[in-house]
Amino acid sequence: MLRVDGLRKTFTTDRGGVRAVEDVSFTVDEGRFFTLLGPSGCGKTTTLRCLAGLERPEAGAITLDERRLSGGGTFVPTHARDIGMVFQSYAIWPHMSVFENVAFPLRVAEPRPGKAEIGRAVGEALALVGLEGLEQRPAPQLSGGQQQRLALARALVRKPKLLLLDEPLSNLDAKLRQRMRIELRELQRRLRITTVYVTHDQGEALFLSHRVAVMQNGRIVQEGRPRDLYASPASGFVADFVGDATFVPGEVIDGGVRALGGTVDCTLSEALAPGEKALLVLRPERVVVRAAPSGAANEFAATLRVAAFLGDHLDCVVDVAGTELRARAHPTAELRREQRVWVELPPEHCLAIPDDGWRPRTLTRTFDDEET
Amino acid sequence: MATLSVARRAGTRIPALRAQTIIVGAAVVLLAYLTLVPLAMLLLGSVSAGSSVLDLQLTLSNFQRVLTDQASLELLSNSLVYGVGSAFLAFAIGTAVAWAVERSDIPGRSLWYGLALVPLIVPGIVHTIAWLFLLSPEIGWINAPLRAAFGFSMSIYSLPGMIWIEGLHTAPLAFVLMSAAFRTMDPSLEEAAATSRADPWATFRRVTLPLLLPSAAAVVLILFVRAIEGFEVPAIIGLPGRIFVYTSRIYTALNQYPSNYGLSAAYGAVLLAISVGALLLHNRVTRRTERFATVTGKAYRPRRISLGRFRVFAVGALVLYAATAVGLPFLVLIYASLVRVYTVPSFETLGDLTLANYGFLATDELTRRALGNSLKLGVATASVVVALTAVIAWVTVRTRVAGRGMLDFLAFVPITIPGIVLGISLIWVSFIVPLRIYGTIWILLVAYVTRYLPYGIRSATAGLVQIHRELEEAASAAGAGWWPTFTRVLLPLLRPALLGAWIYVFIVSLRELGSSVLLASADSVVLAVRIFDLRDSGNYTTIAALSVVLVVILVLLVAALQRIGGRPVREA
Amino acid sequence: MRRYLAAIAVSALLIGACGGGGGGGGPVAATATPTVAPTQTETADQVMARLYEAAKAEGTVAFYSSTNTDDAGKILPVFQAKFPSVKVVHTRKSGEALVQQLVTEKKAGQDLFDVVETNLFEVAFVIEQGYTQKYVTASAGDFPADARAPDGSWIAARFNNDLPGINTTKLPAGVTIKTWKDLCNPALSRKIAVEQSDVVVYSALRKILGDAEAQATLKCIAANQPSLRSGHTDMANLLAAGEFAVTLSSNGHRLAQLKYEENKPIDWAKTDPIITDVQAMALSNKPKNPNAAKLLLEWLVSPDGQRAIASTGRVPASTKVPPKYPDLQNFAKIFFVTAALRADFNSDAEFWRTTLGIK
């Protein structure tokens, strides 16, 4: 079991900015897959590097299976921690063969295993990731996906207590990423190795994890099971980061929220009381567009602005009383631009959270400058 | 109708094709003249019996003498010891400073970076003469107190002395190259070793060292080539100390009379062979590094190692280095420039300082002429090299014209030709090709352009590869022809790379000695040759004054040019 | 067809460019205007006046001389003051380097020098190559036979006394230098310097001491591991600065300058005899500036020019002008270097180089 308590780390970057991890605490149970999710610069990688001992935290404690790794005057150096780590760049040593890369952690072990033992362990690790037969290949000749597997084999070969993964899939192309995340999930579930995973990709986080912690500005803003994060985001930031959402500001009244030129019947977050400002979180995949009214609850007249065919549905933008919402329609629906339509907001999928002033950024976020 | 459209399409295409063909053809002819003709003449000269190729009598006696002479073994061993020694000294200093600046948490990083680069700007001959003042056995600044205190002195007129001076002078080059190596090394490669539970020593031994080895080998080879082709130290330190290497032997073979042109050409050919061998080896090693680099490639935020208690020592060592490489030499030059006849400083001499040497410089016709010629040549060489290589690089990178590989090769060949070998080659060219440019500023321009083509081509090619082809295609799509595309889209985008190359070529042209010393006359005298001749005339104090002026001019020029905009000076 | 024509056009352009660029220098020099032959009746001043008129159009004269820059800086301005329209461009290198440059230029088809002035050995070599012409100066009569060729192929404006130089503060106690053999004293090990091109000293020693003795002397000097220098002035200055205690052969006038004008602890050995190197001058066979060249020659050997040379401390060759430092004149016995001494140059040079380790 991994326990992190009140972790703090501050440093200035080369460009003069300040990055910080503030009061980060979480627990990962034996054999669970835990993900730190957040945008560039949120502190997730720094947290992971503290776990690895590559950064020295200023405060807080890290304990792995009752062994204190950091805090309270102790700091166990990286090489003395029982961990395995996969880096974003894979960090495959180009001067070694595939076999040598995987054998390295065993060769520096004390006591050093025998030759036969090393050969067996390496073979096992390579088989685990599907790289059998490539032992003698020079490492730089591997493809990106193969290098990623090699890095994983290297991290696993000593059967560490804790596996740390720093955006291991981000350098792969989309198709390969899909496949690798399935393999990674299967592997972790099979080996039942305690894993901490860092990513900015909510899809990966939701797919892979038992639990996810969303980080913002160096703090964990919400932690929970993937479905809880999706269904009950604590803030606009989390709602925006986990899943797709349109946000509509409004005011809490009895029986709903005043917005969209009427009253929206919705699930209110516990913290909300009538008279307060609220933010409606509308998941586009739950907002239904029809050419004619269906008489359902929470139905609003709207004007269709965009309707694009995406195979299993039509992706729409509709204008409800001056507010643009993203929504979906049945793929066979015959809709024309600027046509009058009706949108249904099912109350059970319509969540109101306290409005803390946060608004989504208008431009698509890019993660090219993700911290390394 | 169909035929018409075909014809029209052909009609619009042919001129473009022909323009390319003409440019490529002209460039091939020009480059072949600049690089292959001198080499051919060198080889022809080395097997000529007489001192003229016109009465062609082929002989192997020159090579026989070069290869079997008792002294030639010593020459070879001296050259190798000198080259290897200087290379390793420069490498050790440069790597240590680069490590401190790039990988440790030493304070004042950018200050050290700048200071470490200053010696690059100081001409070799100035650096060498400064050390002559510092370490002459009897009158050197360092030796005089050493003898007074301990009763011994170090002689600069020895192989270790030569290695010290050359190594100290090329250390900045090692610094620049190793800094780059440190910067492009992915720190997670080392972190991965730590997470694989390797302790710091095992990490260094099994990951850091093997990864740096190819770049280090490449750097050492470059430094070796630079050292064995250098002329300043062998001429000024080696000759009085009777320690001959190939460059000084080429010079003395010419300067005995009757001049032995054939023998010096033969020595030149041997030196060329060594230099080519080292560079071939370098290219093999570099290909290896590049294969390594495909894993990573970009520059990383380095992992800095905390020096802790050793910080004070590290700063102290850097201060000592800066004082040795920059401070002391400049100080001794300033002092020497202020006395009439060089003497070890004492209260007496300090009370008797004079500006007479600067006065002499101001009125000396040849010095004025040398300054003018050097500036003219610097501007002309830099401009010709940059213009020529921009076109060549465009052809080799962007087009599929036949013979473009040849162009790239031809432009790179001169990197293997030591300056003095190019000098003797061009003398042989002058004996045969009736251009009548020997002794004029034109032959120096030819020599300089030839020597510095490789730096230009490397810079232009690297710059061009980074510019996406689509930027040009967008210009074409917008209706711009080849010439407007080249001048209005490509050149502005290439500006930083080209300006960097321009500044670099300008500086190295201003201090070139190896080929100039054989090619300059009174009309075409240049600064480095003027200093060399003044030394021959015993005017050390005047040389010191000229050196001070030259260094000040160069530092100001570099500062000004960099301000205008350009990359920091990078040695190739 | 059009491509073919274009190729021809390019070649033509290239050839045109080469021809245009290279055509400047040579032919002009080859067809230089002939000058008026000197007549017996003219005085030196008249000759110079006549030459100056013709030289004004030429404007410059290329003077290849191993006179060091300091002294040239005193002598040439006197000429300049008298003949302001003729600018002297002084190429200064030590003898061998100077001759190497001159010969290379000639071989490369360039006629860049007008007057060459350096040691007789080197000048004799240049004359042998046919790169000079005879010219009898109007003042030739003032010069001793040792200082000129009767046919006018060369004339010396100055003498160089080749004297062992001594730094009196660096000379080990108890060592005295009276003759060359004294330089073999082991106390002078690593304290002696030799100018590496001084073959002439060895050639002279062979005549003075006999072959065996000369060889033995050079060998035992070599055993003292001399520092090999390039340039006599350089070596003398370093001697004065204290870099070594003695030199095999320094120029008397430089030693005297350092002793009397710079107050350096310098002295020299008064060997018996004194080797005196003749600094010969010759006129180019194809001077670019023939009148200016002759004017410079005439002036340098005229009493006026000789006085300018004497003012630097150098020893003028003319019998009419005494040197500045009398101790450079009143030597008991003088051995003048002659062109004939060059007869065994190749074997002398070979012995010199191998003995001193100039490989």
Image (tube, rainbow, N blue to C red):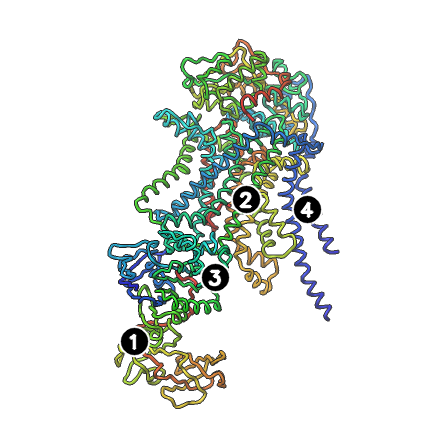
Disc assigned to residue B367: none
Measured in 3D between alpha carbons, the distance from the residue under mark 4 to the one under mark 1, in whole angstroms, is 81 Å
- Packing grade of label 2 (10 A; few <14, some 14-19, many >=20) is some
Query: Which residue matches tag 4?
Result: C14
Query: What is the chain identity of the residue bearing mark 2?
Result: B
- Quarter of the figure with residue A345: bottom left
Query: What is the chain identity of the residue bearing mark 3?
Result: A
Regarding residue B301, the answer to whether it shows in the image is: no
Measured in 3D between alpha carbons, the distance from the residue under mark 4 to the one under mark 2, in whole angstroms, is 37 Å
Disc assigned to residue A131: 3
Measured in 3D between alpha carbons, the distance from the residue under mark 2 to the one under mark 1, in whole angstroms, is 69 Å
In the rendered image, residue C172, in percent from the top left (x then y), is placed at 41, 16
Asked if C358 appears above or below B498 in the picture, the reply is above
Q: Amino acid at mark 2?
A: Leu
Measured in 3D between alpha carbons, the distance from the residue under mark 3 to the one under mark 2, in whole angstroms, is 35 Å
Q: In the image, which is nearer the foreground, mark 2 or mark 1?
A: 2
Query: Which residue matches tag 2?
Result: B281
- Packing grade of label 1 (10 A; few <14, some 14-19, many >=20) is many
- Packing grade of label 3 (10 A; few <14, some 14-19, many >=20) is some
Please tell me which residue is depicted at 27% across the width and 63% down the height of the picture: A5
Does label 2 lie on the same chain as label 3?
A: no
- From the viewer's perspective, is B417 left or right of B6? left
Query: Of label 3 and label 1, which has the lower sequence position?
Result: 3
Label 1 secondary element:
strand
Query: Which residue matches tag 1?
Result: A354
